Amino acid sequence: MTRRQAPRRLHQCRQATNIAASSIIVTMRPRKPSSPKEQALRLLARREHSAKELALKLKRKSRESVVSDTLGADELSPELEALMDTPRAPQPINTDALISELQADQYQSDERFARALVRRRASDGYGPVRIRAELKTHGIAGPVIEQAFNEAEVDWSEQLDRQVQRHLKLVQGSRQEQLKLAAKLQQRGFAGDQIRGAMRRAAAGSDDSDGFDD
């Protein structure tokens, strides 16, 4: 290699190195973080959320994003961070304003959430007492809860009868077994008078049972 060829070769090597470095940086470039609205829409696309639940999830995602970005920034040199255009840690989001916007656009609705939860929990075999309590933990107002129950049109007596029939041996068993079944049904959200009525009906329909006593 002549002296004239050496600088040209060196220049070519530098170009190759720069290209390789650029490829590495492109590979390392982090994805642009989703906006809070995009995150909210993804959550709502999976299932209905109450306003309270959605706000809590968005705040948690925002905190996780801040921690993640902060750790990432500490590991990079200022030059590489600038070259990679690393996004800075997001500012705290105004969840109240965002949820109001989502509600105005009909993306989020506590009414829809309440109806969906009543139907879903009823299909899972839970009773009205437990479902009402769960809706209250979501911050759903009383009138909205009652409207959801009315629109769900669930026959709670029929549902409870089916559950009691599945445990007919306990109904026909000892007093202790009957109380055990009653406690289990109460934990699932049925009221005591509903349970006693269902167990009486089950006992009356059984030939080898003396009935359920209070």
Image: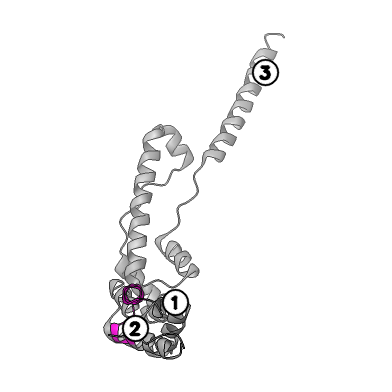
Query: Which residue range is magenta in the image?
Result: 174-196
Residue 109 visible? The answer is no
Looking at the rendering, which quadrant does residue 169 occupy? Answer: bottom left
The question of residue 59 being in magenta is answered with no
First in residue order: circle 3 vs circle 2: 3
Q: Are marks 3 and 2 in contact (CB under 8 Å)?
A: no
Looking at the rendering, which quadrant does residue 38 occupy? Answer: bottom left
- Seen in the picture, residue 93 relative to 17 is either above or below; the reply is below
- Residue 9 bears which disc, if any? 3
Question: For the N terminus, which image quadrant?
Answer: top right
- Mark 3 residue element: helix
> Marks 3 and 1: which is nearer the front?
1
Question: For the C terminus, which image quadrant?
Answer: bottom left
Residue in front for this viewpoint, 43 or 73: 43
Residue identified by numbered label 1? 169
First in residue order: circle 3 vs circle 1: 3
Q: Where residue 108 appears, x then y in whole percent? A: 40, 75
Residue 49 visible? The answer is yes
Q: Are marks 3 and 1 in contact (CB under 8 Å)?
A: no
Residue identified by numbered label 2? 195
Local crowd size for mark 3, using a 10 Å CA cut-off: few (<14), some (14–19), many (≥20)? few
Q: Residue at x 34, y 83 (%)?
A: 195
Q: Amino acid at mark 3?
A: Arg
Q: Amino acid at mark 1?
A: Lys
The question of residue 181 being in magenta is answered with yes
